[in-house]
Image (cartoon, coloured by chain):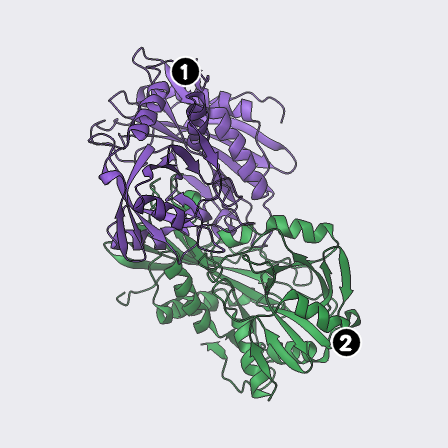
Chain colours: A green, B purple
Amino acid sequence: MAHQALEVMTATHHKTKPDPETLQFGKTFTDHMFIMDYSSENGWHSPRIIPYQPLTLDPAAMIYHYGQTVFEGLKAYRTDDDRILLFRPDENFKRLNRSSDRLSIPDIDEKMVLEYLSELLKLDKDWIPTYEGTSLYIRPFIIATEPNLSVAPSTTYKFMIILSPVGSYYKEGIAPVGIYVEDEYTRAALGGTGMAKTAGNYSAAYKAQDKATAHGQAQVLWLDSSEKKYVEEVGSMNVFFKIDGEIITPSLSGSILEGITRKSIIELLKSWGEQVTERRISIDEILNAVREGRLEEAFGTGTAAVISPIGELSWKGEKTLINQRETGSLSRKLYETLTGIQKGRIEDPLHWTYEVK
Amino acid sequence: MAHQALEVMTATHHKTKPDPETLQFGKTFTDHMFIMDYSSENGWHSPRIIPYQPLTLDPAAMIYHYGQTVFEGLKAYRTDDDRILLFRPDENFKRLNRSSDRLSIPDIDEKMVLEYLSELLKLDKDWIPTYEGTSLYIRPFIIATEPNLSVAPSTTYKFMIILSPVGSYYKEGIAPVGIYVEDEYTRAALGGTGMAKTAGNYSAAYKAQDKATAHGQAQVLWLDSSEKKYVEEVGSMNVFFKIDGEIITPSLSGSILEGITRKSIIELLKSWGEQVTERRISIDEILNAVREGRLEEAFGTGTAAVISPIGELSWKGEKTLINQRETGSLSRKLYETLTGIQKGRIEDPLHWTYEVK
């Protein structure tokens, strides 16, 4: 993709910003959005920032029929000295390209897209909330737009970035959630699309989420699709268990999302001298460790919550408490360190933050 | 859903109809389309036929992010005496509701939707081609429209029907295709969405289709996701094997699409006194039967091709001919019977056709 000049059309009308104390996730959007087009002949072209507006597509556009789409999720933070920080955005755009490869979508130029995102953020800077725990959620996504009912990759696409100010995930401080171990529905199989951030993976999980809710739990713990034995993810987060001082997370099998928070936590723990192991871990091993008092703590990791401590497990009709439903010291330290780095409040020893200038 | 009056806005401009001899699949659409809306408060409402036109949605509409969508595919045929026939449309709308249940989408009133479809077909009747082998492809689909990045079922949806005149699948008469047995990628796992007609299942298959093409074969033969041993589907068709006089098709495991052509062929074969068995069948059993000369013929079944004879298998680098790459007598008889019933040219003993009046 040749470098192309970014066209900027600013909004003449500015929307009212929502109250930062009552922000809901993903319901309010900023004044502008980024969009560029792809065609087989011209590649990615016409990058532009335009006022946030509806999208008009043919009803036969392939996105509506065959799900050829990928997305990313990351956050912009406003520091106490009014700088804009992103957390490892290069990792998000690399993963977007890995997801695109799985879905037969043409890749994007990661560096240029980061430049376009930076321009968009500067324009909508006032939308980045400063209230404790808030941030601006960034949603880059690509959709197949060719009007054609043939089951084949599209020849045209749109790449877009929309921005949404989001509230604190924890209204009353970090707190453990209960999880339901799902043994009927499958999130992803080996050879499927589990490692890709693609739309179909998410709606496929709603039925299992209903079951978790019916069992009084907040999230689903997914097992592998073949044997329904090994732990994969929690909801749309990666998962960690601390057993006998060793911190274990499921290895990237091909059906597990390669979380950027997951990767960062592994790197951070290793930099602290902790023992971290990526391997298969069965639900039986976890429950045995709980019974024998060897499971110290468990937590999910992801962009939305950063760290989500696990306080309870429901499995085959039985409920098991983890760490007396309290937030473990490791969960708390990881949460405070990661959010501290993201907000630019503490040192960033592994050079993860990217300042938008 | 209460009965609601259908609003009809006819097109003032009529598009030029394509040459029936050079029709491509799914690229040309008729003058009108059907649309109705759903909201949690009002259920499905405002059914209307309007001129075919682009759809305008918020870029945060859930269809673009979490793939909450289902679809159907069926055909309208114009008989030699100018009647409009559909093939088992009630089965399509029942399956649409089964797919919707899996994707947490509200169900539609199957009878009313068939009435709406009938009105749309009457209005666009001149678009149903009459040329040998042609038909009007019907694509009903539902998409989640709520602008919200939360990973949860949408509270608003659109149900739409678009129509596309399609050419003959076989330009030069029914002919066998080669298939590539895929042992890396997975179409669907148990507990996944394989039984639902939902977008994500289709784009997930493009990488495997690329491999089939690279191996010189037309379609992918999918194996089960757990053991990569049992046959599931061919491309987006169900599959049948005739071995030692017995006709075998994989049983509906939960990861296989419940094809309406599949179901019809089983019923038809049974009405002819043939032995049909729905059971697990491994790729080894099939290749052994070929080697021992006991595999008489194999074919895929689906709405697009009706019957697609299989003439060759690629598996682990070896190519195996089936029935000397010729169309078997059973494949031909099934094809002629089903297409004859669909076009209203022969008796319809099982009462499958529905006349639009």
Q: Quadrant of residue A19?
A: bottom right
> Mark 1, chain letter?
B
Q: Quadrant of residue B274?
A: top left
Query: Residue at point 41% right, 21% down?
Result: B272
Q: Is residue B115 above or below residue B284?
A: above
Q: Is residue A78 left or right of residue A324?
A: left
- Which residue, as the protein is rendered here, is positioned at the far front? B292
Residue type, label 1: Asp
Q: Is residue A235 visible?
A: no
> Mark 2, chain letter?
A
Of the pair A153 and A225, the residue shown nearer to us:
A225
Q: Is residue B323 above or below residue A84?
A: above
- Within-10-Å neighbours for mark 2: few <14, some 14–19, many 20+: few
- Indicate the secondary structure of the residue bearing disc 2: loop
Quadrant that contains the N terminus of chain B:
top right
Where is mark 2, residue-wise? A293
Q: Is residue B215 visible?
A: yes
Quadrant that contains the C terminus of chain B:
top left
Residue A332: image location, x then y, percent:
69, 77
Q: Is residue A113 left or right of residue B48?
A: left
Q: CA distance from mark 2 to mark 1?
A: 69 Å
Where is mark 1, residue-wise? B348
Residue B136: image location, x then y, percent:
34, 26
Residue A337: image location, x then y, percent:
62, 81
Residue type, label 2: Gly
Query: Residue at point 25% right, 27% down?
Result: B16
